[in-house]
Amino acid sequence: MDITENYEYGGWKKCVRIANEEMEAVILTDVGPRIIRFGFIDGINILGENKEQQGKTGGDEWMIYGGHRLWHSPEDIIRTYSPDNGPVNYELDGETLKMVQDVEDKTGIRKEMEITFGKKNNVKILHRLVNKSQWGIEAAPWAITVMAKGGRAIIPQEPYRAGDADLKPARSLVLWPYTRMADSRFIWGNKFIQVGQVPGAEEKQKIGVLNTAGWFAYSLKECLFIKSYKHKPDAKYPDFGANIEVYTDSEVLEMETLGGLGMIPPGGSAEHIEEWHIFREEMKEDEEFLEKKLMPIVKEL
């Protein structure tokens, strides 16, 4: 594995680049913590970038920048959008890069990320919220990844079983006031729910799902990105019980996972882990194709 400090990317001067023989990640330290690039060394950036905000630092306005970030849920217009426009402290511990943000003035929360490259196409990201205030804070870690334009999120459905022997519900679907289920960006399949990112689309859309399968994916051209995580049956998840969410508008599609919602005591912390996987595979919309092509990949994670 190769680690390069003070790596220049998109106008930022002090990034950290982590790479192995096949893939690379670029992590911002001028602002953040943010992962701004992830992909094969010779391939596209599967993460979306806001070109107009590249290289910017400072200011009191929250910036999307792009890439991967850590928030805390439930969403609140004041608390959630605390700016992360300042420098981030970091340290290297073997093959792990630990990012530590300054404590947020409005919340008393400190955000941390630990990024570890695993096998050739696998990255582990530990997200941590640390309560540095004098009071307990109810929150859940919320890992949000802005994806590159033009792709499609793929969410597994719960296994279908015919008949009326199963009396308990198998899944939940969470909708927002602006969700239009008839929007053409949604594909409501029997085996998968798919959400497309369409540049220039006039309306924003969002759904949440209690996804017990522990993974969902993003397909763009010949690149397949998979997020995996551990579903915790006993956890209380925010937003009517959603542990994953997909948001899209004319510019972005965000793949979001959430940890359990709970009280973080003073000096305490809450953690949430994602694993990222990337493959040189193209995924069609057809469900039978996905069943034959995508599911064998998932089973090997």
Image: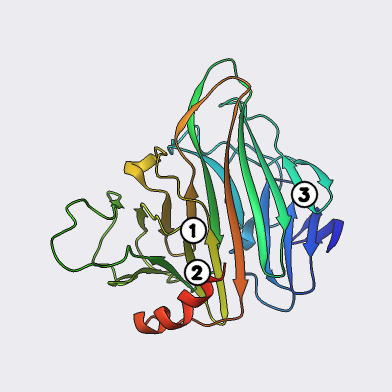
Residue 188 in the image, given as x and y percentages of width and height: 28, 70
Quarter-of-image position of residue 58:
top right
Residue identified by numbered label 3: 97
Residue in the image at 72% along x and 54% along y: 116
Q: Position of residue 225 (x, y in %)?
A: 56, 69
Query: Is disc 1 placed on a helix, strand or loop?
Result: strand
Estimate the spatial distance between the alpha carbons at disc 1 and disc 2, rounded to whole Å.
Answer: 8 Å
Residue count near mark 2 (Cα–Cα under 10 Å), binned few <14, some 14–19, many ≥20: many
Percent coordinates x, y for residue 50 in the rendering: 60, 60
Q: Hey, which residue is sitting farthest top in the picture?
A: 134
Label 3 element class:
strand
- Mark 1 vs 2: CB contact within 8 A: yes
Which residue: 43% across, 83% down? Answer: 292
**Looking at numbered disc 1 in the image, what kind of residue is underneath it?**
Met
> Does the image show residue 38?
yes
Q: Is residue 253 left or right of residue 183?
A: right
Whole-percent x and y of residue 152?
45, 71
Q: Which residue is mark 1?
A: 255
Q: Earlier in the sequence, mark 2 or mark 3?
A: 3
Residue beneath disc 2: 218
Q: Is the image coloured rainbow, by chain, by secondary structure, or in one colour?
A: rainbow
The first of marks 3 and 1 along the sequence is: 3
**Which residue is depicted at the point 54% across and 66% down?**
226
114 left or right of 50 in image: right
